[in-house]
Amino acid sequence: MRFDAVDFLERAVRTPSNEDAGPMRELLCAALRSHGVEPRVDSAGNVLATQGPDGETSRAVSDPAGGASPGETGEGDVSGPHVVLNTHLDTVSPHVSFEREGDVLRGRGTCDAKGPLAAFLRAFLAAEPERGRLTLAVTPDEETRSTGAAALVGGEDGCGSDTARGDSTVLGLDADRGDCVIVGEPTALDACNAAKGRFEGVIEVRGESAHAAEPASGANAVGAAAPALDALRTFDDREASLAHPALGGPTLTPTRIEGGEATNQVPAACRITIDRRSVPPETGAGFERALDGHLRAALDGAGFGPSGGVGTTNGSAATDGTGTTDRTANGAGGVEVAFRLAERETPFLEAFETPADAPVVAALRSASGGRVRPFAAATEASYFAACVPTVVFGPGALADEAGPVAHADREYVRVPAVEAAADALEAALATLLG
């Protein structure tokens, strides 16, 4: 019996997964079992199912907690590529109830990413690989920590590390064998072969508190935020080559600023949270080093540096003739600044680009009739793209002519788009595994 993707999608959207992916995981596992596929749930909460000639004879796939995953006990080389269909169970908050208006399905997750999941599930169940292996790998926390995806590629070690488990990852991916990953997100049926990365970090500005009536006796951390914000605007002017031919330039956006304890006190601390959307080849570590150095130089140049800046003589604090330290009339100088990426238990999502002529990109483009283009948001595709060619694909859109769709209260997907996505995936899989 052919799997009904739309019926599954309706039930999925009626199953909230913004706070707990457990019920959605149970729904997915039940759907697989009802069609003769026994799924497995690993210790990271991923749902995995495998089929194909090499599904029982491939290298053992390690569970993140150690040991072989159930159903993956054989050994030896596979005879064809390993294709992974990946998307996620969770959604953002708040939950938005399901509604149907003709061919339009509305509610949280309809396009991000339960619509893609429904299409992927239909394609997985319909596939009859003649060679290699097909794996459905659905993660539980893409919208938050991405611990599921990180576990699939070996956690902190990442892909290709000397200490990564399995063939090169927990999934056993190998670029030399022709392996690839298709990640389900709302792309309007376009084959998205690149995406910007996303980093988050905090600028810490440290000064010295004082009475606001005597600002020169302190070091104003909030005042130093002004040149720090200016430095954010000029950061990407350092290298014109940072622009990417497909993704454009990176962005650096201050998203939150906090500082001060009392309205009559020179503030000793200020925190600025930033959002970075990166392009290849920038890495998180490289960005952290570069922005930290840029901020230090900018504050020194503006007279807020730790040496005292304006109001100092030969690096020593001047006085106003009464013995009071005079850093400047507004408490400039004597400020320290540092930038660090936010702490995460999983790696940040770095930018990636898969060549437009990669077989997985070409197969999806041909099957869907869509364009090859970048995806506007950061996704777990970043983890897989470090290992093998990866493309983002699915029904629905992040936004339309009326405004935001994904993550918005008006989130929706059209039934024909879900069916078309499943048709395209089935055709692409036949090409890749036929």
Image (cartoon, helix red, strand yellow):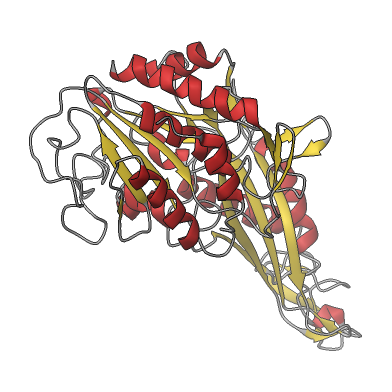
Residue shown at 56% from the left, 58% from the top:
17
| Residue 320 appearing in the image | no
Q: Residue 309 occupies which quadrant of the picture?
A: bottom right
Q: Nearer the viewer, residue 290 or 262?
A: 262
Looking at this rendering, what residue extends furthest in the front direction? 1
Left or right of 171 in this view: 294: right
Q: Nearer the viewer, residue 181 or 230?
A: 181
How far from the left and from the top, in percent, is residue 67?
16, 57
Please state, as top left, top right, bottom left or bottom right, where the C terminus lies in the image.
top left
Q: Residue 250 occupies which quadrant of the picture?
A: top right
How far from the left and from the top, in percent, is residue 144?
54, 57
Left or right of 384 in this view: 392: right
Looking at this rendering, what residue extends furthest in the right direction? 213
Please state, as top left, top right, bottom left or bottom right, where the N terminus lies in the image.
top left
Q: Residue 122 occupies which quadrant of the picture?
A: top left
Q: Nearer the viewer, residue 361 or 429?
A: 429
| Residue 16 appearing in the image | yes
How far from the left and from the top, in percent, is residue 363?
43, 15
